[in-house]
Each structure stands twice: as C-alpha cells, then as structure tokens.
C-alpha cells in the first residue's frame, strides 16, 4: 500500500520545547481530535479544526516557559487531563481549560522531564529524579549524569512501578523505588523514550529510545537483565531524534513508528516482514520537530500525523486527498470552500501589512522624540554543539525562531570549518592577526531568505584549547545580535565510552597533592568533553574515553588527593600533564606529578595512524593526477591507452575531488599528530628533538611504515 500524505499548516504558537504537544482522545470513533500545546510564553493552547480552520477551545494566560506537557487521568480511562511542567511547578487543566491542580514541587531546579501514570507523577531536573503519588513525595534518585527523559513501564501490565531515566552518558537507568536496579548501555546519548506500540508491547516491557546522534532502538526491560531487540544506525547522517510516537497511519492494523528529528526530518517506519522497522516515508520540515502525534485532526475519517516545530508551527501530514479538477490547458477549478479560505487569507495578509506599516511609523516617530526609549527585541536561540564520532568533527547547530540574517563565527584557537551539504549559506573569511589577539578564525555565514536553521561542522586540534564564539543576527528591526560561546577543550576529540581494551600498552600519569575531589573533578571537566559538571557523590570515580580520530583510549580514575590517567597515546598523557599542572598552579595547589611511559605504546599508536595516513596519501596523489589525466584525455580523444589504475582515477574524479574537499588539511592534521607523538616521546625522556622535525617530515613525504618506526626508535 502506497502512502500519500499532504501537508497542512494549522496554527503558530510561541517557541516550543521537546514533548509539549498532544492530541486529546477522540469523543467518538473516527471523530476529530483536539490539539493541546504549550510554549515558551507559558501559554497552553487547545484548538480543534473545523472546515480547515483552527477553532480555539481555550487558551491560558502567559507565564513561565512550559518545558513538558503530558496527558493523564485514572488508569484504564481516557487520558484527557492536561498536565504541564513550568519552572518547578506542575499545573493540571481539564479538557475545557479549567485549572484543577497547582503543585509546587520541592525541586530547586526547573523541571526538564515529566511522565504521568494514574496518580503517580515522575519528575526530573538536570540530575535529580523525584516520584510523587497524589502529590506526596515517594522516591528520590541522584543521577550520575544529566537526565534527558523519563518514562515508567505500564503499571496496568506489570505488578510494580519501573521508572527508566534516559541519561546523557549513553545509559538508560532502570530504577526500583529510590534505588538503581541496573544500567543499560546504548550507542548514543538517549534524548527521548517511548513505550513500544504505545503500551510497552505484549509484555509491557518494550521500550523505544532515540539518541542525539540519530540512532533508534528497542530494548526489553525485564527485572533480571535487559534484552536489546534491535537498533537502527543513522546511515543517512540525519539529525538527532527528539520525539517518537506509534500510530497506524497505513490502516493495516499494525502501528507504524513516527519519528521527529532536530534537522526537521519526519520519518515513518513500518514492520513489513522483518522484526526491525523499515523506513517507509519521510518529509522534510525546515526546523526541528519538537513533538509528533498520530491521530485524526483535520477531517472526520482521515488520519494524519501532527508535528510541532521549534518556532511553534503545528503542521499536519494528512491522508485526505487534495482534489484537483481539470487537465492540461484548462484552468484549475477550486472548490468554494478553498476560494473562501484564499480570500480570507488575502484579507488577513493585507490587514497585517497595514498594521506593520503603522507600527513602523510609530516606532520611527518615538525614536525621534526626546523621551525615546530604545528596546532590544528578544529572540530565542536553540543551539547544540556536539562531537560526531563518525568523522571526529564538532557539529554546531543554530536555530532561531525567526529568519537568520547572518552568523559571525570567531575562534581564539586553530579550527577547520568543514563543508555541510545541507548548508546553503554563503561563507566568507576575514583575515586574522593571530599573534597579539589570539584570533585564529573569523568567518561570516550569510543566510538565504527564510533560513531559520544553520548547521556548521568544525574540527579542532587536541592540545589547543579556548573558546569558539557565534554572533547570531536575525532579520528583525532594530538590528540586534546574540552571542553564544562554546568551549574547545584540551582533549576535544575524546568521547565517553563504557569499555576500553585493557590489553593495550598503556602510559600512566599520576597526580598527588592537597586538592579536594571537587577540585580535581573540575580539572577533568575542563580537559575532557562529556564529563558531568556536577561532582559525583562517590568517593572516587572512573571514566573511560576514546579518541574519535585515532581510536586511542584514556582511563581516568581520581579521588580526593590523587588521580591516575592511563592512555595508549603518549600525546594524550602529555596534554593532560601540561593542562593539569597549569590549572593546579592557577589555584596555588602543589602537585606531585609522576609518570610511567611504555615504549611499546609508540609503535602501537603509529599502527593506528597507519591506515588513515596511507589512505590520505593515496587520495592526495590521485587528486594531483586528475588534471594531467584530463588533459591527456582531451588531447588523445580516448583513455584506452591508459593503464586501468589511471582510467579508474578518471572515472571516479568527481567523487575523489568531493572527498578531498570535505577533508581539508586532513593530511596535515595526521602529520601534526605524528610530529607531536615524536616530540612528546622524547620530552618525557628529557630530550628536545624539535631540530629533528624537518627530517621526520621528509620521511613522511616518502612514507613507509617501517622506516617511520625505525626513525622513532633511532632518532636520538
């Protein structure tokens, strides 16, 4: 069965957060459903659709921003009570808009995630989970990393309450009361949870999760141990998953998976003949999808998928066919209902244009008066700065509620800007004077009309740390700008992992001194990404990391007064030694530093670099030959006289050039890493070998792995 969906834009509210839009249960079979949505203005809007127009049911007064919206009610009854989380408070409304609950929690932070099951209320701030029953405190848990979402398995099917936390450190934490039952590790930071089939499947224990790097998975959460059912990797390099729903849009009796991503991609997966879902349909919206629901909204008898976006648009993809009459050469006949709608929209547009002109004149007159007060217009920015494991680059996503005019990117550390296929903005670089001002990058992205989302890719160099700044200017008057800052950390290409290979040859750095657990934790946070800012509650902690570029590893164990760092890359240990010494000196803490260097780790690291270096050298040589081969082809008229290797280069010329363009300075980056490894190896022996670097570069230019290893062992 082929799926045909037509897009309908219903209304626009204020800026919305993740999971803040729901469909109320239908009053009758195949009847239309009401939509309820909460926004950053603190307004809860409920509306229905009649004759294609949004008709309001109720609208609350503005207040604090709404961070979550859930439906609830007594178990085994229609879930039609509306609950919103705003600040540290939970409010409840009936489907008619009457407020029946105002529950001020004991949370000191704003509520980030919420789930409701009957009389049970599950709330999460950044690190704290609370369970309330009939608004009375029941259980509490302090998470080791930030909590992104919370869900409880259906108590109707299971005899016990089983809450699950989706945490930033790539872990699902399954709780029992106030205790951790066990942890489930997943291949990405889980951002959203949902019950499979809307009810946890036959067992009630099946849990769907979506990650920040776009992976989708299903886990069966049992009391003994979890079972990974399936996981779909993000092969198409699409955005992170923000919302999941289950709905039978095909009408075949099996619910499809509805997925909303932060790059505006809406996807429908269905289960054909396999246990794993298969992508059946996708549709691109221009901004991130914060909520997604399946139901009947626009017209009786026609199912649709409803999505809310970051800037507050409520958009439907409906199965209702759009009727068009008339063949080629004939005028298109439009129904009377559609003609009335077009006329109404034209009148509304004219009215708005007149109002804009009046307000503009009013502002101009007030700005000339002696009592003029200049007000900077406020606008909301949604940003995300994350490390991509696949290509060892940072992705900077900037999303604004209105059209972006330009974005100025400035960095006080050397970074490379990589090409992004989705990016249609025009980039221009300005000259920088890096010596006195530490200004290494100044680039301006000029966006096309109606661009509200911009994605940039940045690659950093480990050991060079500082700040990346983005100045965002939208197309609003008077001109205003917002500044966003992002820290480039000393070991910026390292990513948290749960396992490392302990059989590798490891170098060890040991610190001892009069420092607190909080102090050494703050130093580790400064050095490494993906470390929770909150100091752990345990007496000691161990974190594992993997370098996304080289696949080298790092083990970090520390407590009050001492720290141990192990890595199979000497350069990682060298960077840590320099930065930790500097941070301790700033705080006037005396450190006793010792280290144990394993000579075998050098050849081990060179072997890890070898395939990447060999590939890049071969790619560079092929690209250098393309122009000469093309001239030969034009001159001779054919390529029959060329050997097969050269013919392949000509056939793949476009692909080779595209790949080479996507990886600027890749070869230089590998040369730099080998040079740093060479210098660091002998630095720990107390020898300065910087004068030998030109000789090392000569060996790299005529690269041979054995010759390079021999040079490392005999250079001094």
Image (tube, helix red, strand yellow):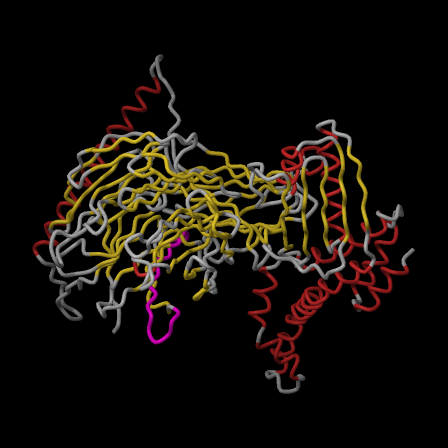
For the point 67% across and 43% down, the residue is 490
- Asked if residue 262 lies in the magenta stretch, the reply is yes
Taking the view exactly as shown, the residue that stands out farthest to the left is 336
- Residue 243 position in % (x across, y down): 36, 52
Looking at the rendering, the stretch of residues picked out in magenta corresponds to: 261-276
Vertical order, 515 against 8 (above or below): above
- Residue 82 position by quadrant: top left
Residue 293 vs residue 348, the one in the foreground = 293
Q: Where's the C terminus, which quadrant?
A: bottom right
- Residue 186 position in % (x across, y down): 50, 57
Taking the view exactly as shown, the residue that stands out farthest to the front is 159
* Residue 637 placement, left or right of 382: right
- Residue 649 position in % (x across, y down): 62, 76
For the point 59% across and 66% down, the residue is 657
For the point 22% across and 39% down, the residue is 45
- Residue 104 position by quadrant: top left
Vertical order, 321 against 376 (above or below): below
């Amino acid at each position: 069965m082929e799926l045909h969906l037509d897009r309908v834009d219903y209304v626009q509210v204020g800026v919305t957060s993740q999971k803040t839009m729901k469909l109320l249960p239908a009053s009758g079979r195949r009847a239309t459903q009401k939509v309820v949505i909460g926004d950053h203005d603190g307004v809860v809007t409920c509306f229905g659709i009649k004759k294609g127009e949004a008709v309001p049911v109720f609208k609350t007064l503005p207040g604090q921003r709404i961070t979550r919206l859930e439906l609830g009610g007594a178990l085994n009854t229609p879930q039609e009570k509306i609950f919103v989380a705003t600040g540290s408070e939970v409010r409840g409304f009936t489907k008619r808009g009457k407020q029946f609950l105002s529950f001020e929690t004991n949370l000191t932070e704003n509520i980030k995630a919420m789930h409701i099951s009957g009389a049970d209320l599950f709330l999460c701030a950044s690190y704290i989970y609370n369970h309330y029953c009939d608004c009375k405190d029941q259980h509490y848990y302090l998470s080791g990393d930030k909590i992104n979402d919370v869900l409880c398995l259906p108590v109707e099917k299971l005899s016990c309450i089983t809450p699950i936390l989706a945490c930033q450190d790539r872990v699902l934490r399954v709780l029992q009361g106030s205790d951790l039952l066990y942890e489930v590790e997943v291949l990405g930071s889980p951002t959203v949870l949902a019950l499979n089939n809307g009810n946890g499947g036959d067992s009630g224990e099946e849990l769907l999760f979506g990650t920040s790097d776009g992976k989708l998975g299903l886990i069966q959460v049992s009391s003994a141990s979890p079972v990974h059912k399936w996981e779909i990797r993000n092969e198409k390099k699409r955005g992170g998953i923000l919302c999941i729903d289950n709905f039978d849009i095909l009408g075949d009796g099996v619910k499809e998976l509805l997925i909303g991503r932060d790059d505006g991609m809406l996807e429908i997966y269905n289960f054909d003949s396999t246990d794993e879902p298969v992508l059946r349909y996708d549709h691109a919206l221009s901004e991130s999808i914060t909520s997604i629901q399946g139901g009947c909204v626009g017209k009786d008898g026609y199912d649709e998928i409803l999505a809310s976006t970051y800037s507050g648009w409520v958009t439907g993809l409906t199965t209702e066919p759009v009727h068009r009459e008339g063949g080629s050469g004939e005028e298109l006949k439009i129904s009377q209902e559609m003609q009335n709608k077009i006329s109404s929209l034209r009148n509304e547009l004219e009215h708005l244009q007149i109002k804009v002109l009046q307000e503009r004149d009013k502002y101009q007159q007030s700005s000339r008066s002696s009592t003029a007060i200049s007000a900077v217009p406020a606008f909301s920015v949604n940003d995300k700065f994350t490390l991509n494991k696949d290509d060892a680059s940072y992705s900077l996503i900037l999303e604004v509620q209105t059209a972006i005019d330009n974005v100025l990117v400035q960095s006080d550390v050397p970074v490379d800007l990589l090409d992004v296929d989705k990016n249609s903005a025009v980039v221009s670089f300005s000259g920088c004077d890096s010596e006195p001002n530490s200004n290494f990058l100044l680039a301006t992205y000029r966006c096309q009309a109606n661009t509200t989302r911009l994605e940039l890719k940045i690659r950093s160099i480990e050991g060079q740390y500082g700040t990346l700044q983005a100045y965002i200017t939208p197309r609003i008057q008077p001109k205003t700008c917002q500044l966003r800052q992002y820290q480039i950390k000393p070991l910026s290409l390292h990513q948290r992992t749960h396992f490392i290979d302990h059989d590798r040859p490891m170098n060890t750095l040991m610190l001892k001194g009069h420092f607190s657990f909080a102090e050494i934790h703050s130093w580790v946070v400064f050095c490494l990404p993906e470390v929770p800012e909150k100091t752990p509650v345990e007496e000691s902690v161990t974190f594992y990391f993997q370098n996304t570029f080289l696949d080298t590893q790092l083990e970090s164990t520390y407590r009050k007064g001492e720290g141990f760092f192990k890595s199979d890359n000497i350069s990682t240990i060298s960077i840590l030694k320099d930065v930790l010494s500097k941070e301790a000196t700033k705080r006037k803490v005396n450190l006793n530093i010792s280290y144990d260097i394993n000579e075998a780790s050098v050849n081990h690291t060179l072997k890890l670099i070898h395939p990447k270096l060999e590939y890049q050298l071969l790619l560079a040589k092929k690209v250098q030959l393309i122009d000469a081969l093309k001239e030969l082809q034009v001159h001779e008229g054919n390529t029959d006289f060329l050997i097969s290797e050269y013919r392949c280069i000509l056939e793949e010329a476009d692909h080779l050039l595209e790949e080479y363009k996507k990886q600027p300075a890749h070869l230089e980056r590998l040369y730099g890493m080998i040079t740093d490894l060479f210098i660091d190896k002998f630095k720990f022996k107390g020898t300065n070998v910087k004068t030998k670097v030109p000789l090392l570069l000569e060996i790299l230019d005529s690269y041979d792995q054995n010759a390079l290893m021999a040079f490392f062992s005999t250079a001094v």
